[in-house]
Amino acid sequence: MSLVTASPPLDVEAVRGDFPILAQQVNGHPLAYLDNAASSQRPLQVLEAMQNYYTHDHANVHRGVHSLSHRATDHYEAARETVRAFVNAASVREIIFTRGTTEAINLVAFSFGQRLQAGDEILITAMEHHSNIVPWQLLCERSGAVLRVAPINDAGELVLAEFMALLGPRTKLVAVTHVSNALGTVNPVKVLIAAARSRGIPVLLDGAQAIPHQAVDVRDLDCDFYAFSGHKMCGPTGIGVLYGREAMLQDLPPFQSGGDMILTVSFKGTTYNELPYRFEAGTPHIAGAIGLAAAMNYLTRLGLPSIAAWEAGLLSYATGLLLQLPGLSIVGTARDKASLVSFNIAGIHPHDLGTILDQRGVAIRAGHHCAMPVMERFGLAGTARASFAFYNTRGEIDQLLDALRLAQRMFA
């Protein structure tokens, strides 16, 4: 990836010791977990942080006067500060805990979307995940706004000239993926953001596939919103983050209503809480936030440059081996790619590949990857996708290749 730099090498065998789930066998074979773009695994450090909260400090936050509530609140808000530092936000007021990337994008679509009127335009790309398509379609139905889609080329790269041509006086929001989950393409987001901001257009980045693999600095990117999930970066499921520029969030109406997002309630009216609590209605996923902070601390301790370097090596190794298989074609050959490979083998359905590989202990993803427009662009029903994390090894890629050769023999 573009942020790979000289860095200390990972001790991958030591790292794997932090992930006991990887030591198991599946169908009599060592597990080769290559479905990290769907969800990564969790290290002991994350599990222990959550267990410690549940066994020592669990209580509701922000409302209690007793000791456990104070401790839970302190841990929860310390987690927010960890997230702030991890993405280099200017203030914890800019860090909103959500259930994940999907809810974060829906929050923006609902709250920011109330500004849009008939004829306004939202610009996305043809490589988006459904979570960065459907919320805007629903917004367009409500408001009369128009969804514009910048095309991609045969390599799975954004056609930059077409994107720039679609930026116009009616464009009210740009919402693009930082890294494609189906193709691995790393978008030139700083270029896109600079072009949009020069025209006064806010930008949302779907960072779900980027933040596990590279350092993300929201102030350096200069984006207005950045959405990501915990479960793709060694954290818990059901927790995510929306970073929002404070000046932008300050003027947005609430997304959901209920406890904790209010200051006062009467039958005559309600006054809303300050940032970020205005966007965090109800009891939050306290243990999830604590687990996410532990995951961020774990990744920071390993070093994101070291992670990126190891994963880049895995991607290069896997790509070279896969291309040796007759009848195999890689879908998504961008010059700047994340550590995943989508592919098809002539005469074998991706679902059949996934099933056969599972019998050999290899976990991959098969299907449209919640990116059906991408598959339509390439004339495919789906692909097989192997996605790598820093705890994967070349030996697991060899295991993948052996299983693919078996599948070819079965369908010969």
Image (tube, rainbow, N blue to C red):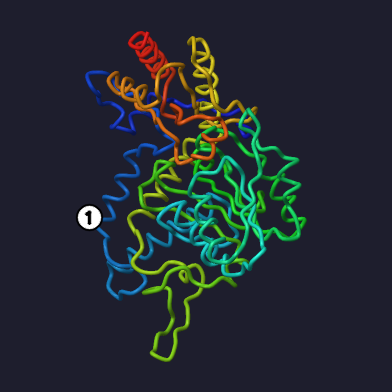
Please state which amino acid type lies under the numbered disc 1: Thr
Q: Is residue 366 visible?
A: yes
Query: Considering the numbered disc 1 on the image, is that residue within a helix, a strand or a loop?
Result: helix
Q: Where residue 84 sits: x, y (%)?
A: 52, 56
- Mark 1, residue position: 55
With respect to residue 317, does 208 lie above or below? below
Q: Is 403 displayed left or right of 221 in the figure?
A: left
Image quadrant in which you'd find residue 115: bottom right
Picture residue at 36% right of the left edge, 63% below the top: 284
- In this rendering, the answer to whether 190 lies above or below 219 is above
Query: As displayed, is residue 382 above or below residue 44?
Result: above
Residue 247, visible in the rendered structure: no
Locate residue 379: give its quadrant.
top right
Tell whether 313 sits left or right of 261: right
Which is more toward the observer, 264 or 168?
168
Please report the residue visible at 24 percent of the width from the left and 57 percent of the height from the top: 56
Q: Which class describes the residues within 10 Å of circle 1: few (<14), some (14-19), or many (20+)? A: few
Relative image position of residue 110 (x, y in whole percent): 51, 65
> Which one is in front, 365 or 234?
365
Residue 60, quarter of the rendered image:
bottom left
The structure residue drawn at horizontal position 75% and vertical position 50%, both measured from the top left corner, is 195
Residue 234 position in % (x across, y down): 40, 41
Which quadrant would the N terminus be assigned to in this image? Answer: top right
The image shows residue 250 at horizontal and vertical percentages of 58, 71
